[in-house]
Image: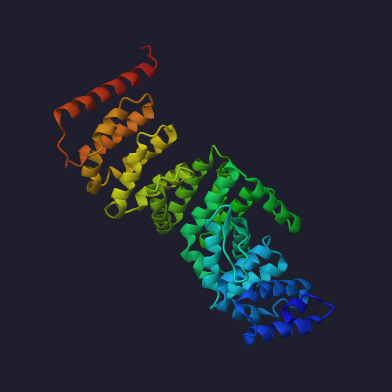
Amino acid sequence: MAIGGTANSDLFNAQTSAALLDLLVENGVYNGKQVPAIVRCIHQWLTSNVSAEHRLDKTLVLLTEAHPVDVAVTLLRSAPACDRAARTMWRTLISSRGTKEPVLQILFRALKFWPAHRTRTSDGDESDVFALAATVALWEILQLPWCPRGVKKNFPRLLLTLLFQVFISTEEMSEEVETFWGRCREQRSLPPNPNRFAVQTVKALLRQLLDEDVVMVIHRKCGWDMLLKADSHHYAVGLLARELCRVSHSFCRSVAANLLPRLSREEPLWELPALAFLVEVLHCLNPRQCGLSVLQIISRRLRSECPERRRLALRGLVVISKAPAMAKSIWSLNESLLELLQDADRDVVQMTLSAFINVLHLKTIQISSPTALKLLEALRLLFENVRLCVPHRRH
């Protein structure tokens, strides 16, 4: 009766409602199925009582320590646009030692599933929890003057998830996502398209963990605009990777460690941007630790029908071919590489030759006569093409 009545101002005044909620939570006078209703009551109370927005902080924290999933998921469902009351609740939970880690992990899980994740709460509700609702909540958390440790620890996963959100909401927008985002925009001022909001959140993440300079450099090079276009998205991801390398090799290694399993599973949806990022950070990685995984990823794309995938794979191969530890493994691909020497794309031929030369320069490989002849023929054709392309000069 009390849970139902706290939302009704005709039955209880503001102070009485707050006291009842305190009583219910502090003394455990409720069952698990009522937790979502209590969360909604706290949200409604905060909506109506602007001047006392921290009155129920302790109550909310106690409830979340006992039922983190019910609290976080209910808040995502009931306030997906993250209004003033919801912002207060999220910031309270992130500021508390006992609730910040479990709440962040629930948010990260919701972010991971596009467009929506179904999680049953104690009252039996298993309606969709949209990834965009978790993105809005994360953006609000990133406005804090300090960055939660859980965000720093999960930076690689968050960055890749947000970049994927930008990509998928640029490539295709399902009707359910458009409807959901439209409802959110009715409640508060948000960008017209989800991909723009995801980019806004990427910027906030970088500002918290690195500095404003990275954001501004990418802006000057038109990277943020390129990120919002399907045909240039992977170029922007490569640009972001280069700027991250300039600032922090450790961040890049962490992101690459999260990318390797994705590319190993051959996920085609975000494959090209992921490959573009990996190629830009290869020089930060230790080939003895991950060289074979990288080579496996690259080798599968050397014969790709997509020219850009093929070029990216060869760029990566040129980088790792400089490592002595990779020479024998790369040489096992010599048949595929010899075929690429016949490619009509001169850049493909030049990168293939560079990889061959790097491996042979290490002097750990003995080249057979037939292979040597094929290499020489490729070099002759390459030089002949260059000679034909350069106009004759009159002396």
Task: Judge whether 164 appears above or below 313 on screen.
Answer: below
- Name the colour scheme: rainbow
Given residues 166 and 72, the one toward you in this image is 72
Name the quadrant containing residue 254.
bottom left
Q: Is residue 301 left or right of residue 227?
A: left
- At 36% across and 16% down in the image, what residue appears? 388
Name above or below for residue 230 compared with residue 257: above
Q: Position of residue 31 (x, y in %)?
A: 62, 80
Residue 225 visible in the picture: no
Q: In the shown orientation, is residue 207 left or right of residue 191?
A: left
> In the image, residue 365 lies at what x, y percent?
17, 39
Q: Residue at the far top: name it.
A: 394
Tell me the quadrant of the picture where the N terminus can be found: bottom right
Q: Which residue occupies the foreground of this view, 116 or 281?
A: 116
- Compared across the picture, whether 100 is left or right of 37 comes to left
Q: Residue at x 56, y 52 (%)?
A: 114
The percent position of residue 105, horizontal first and vertical second, equals 51, 66
Image quadrant where residue 305 sits = top left
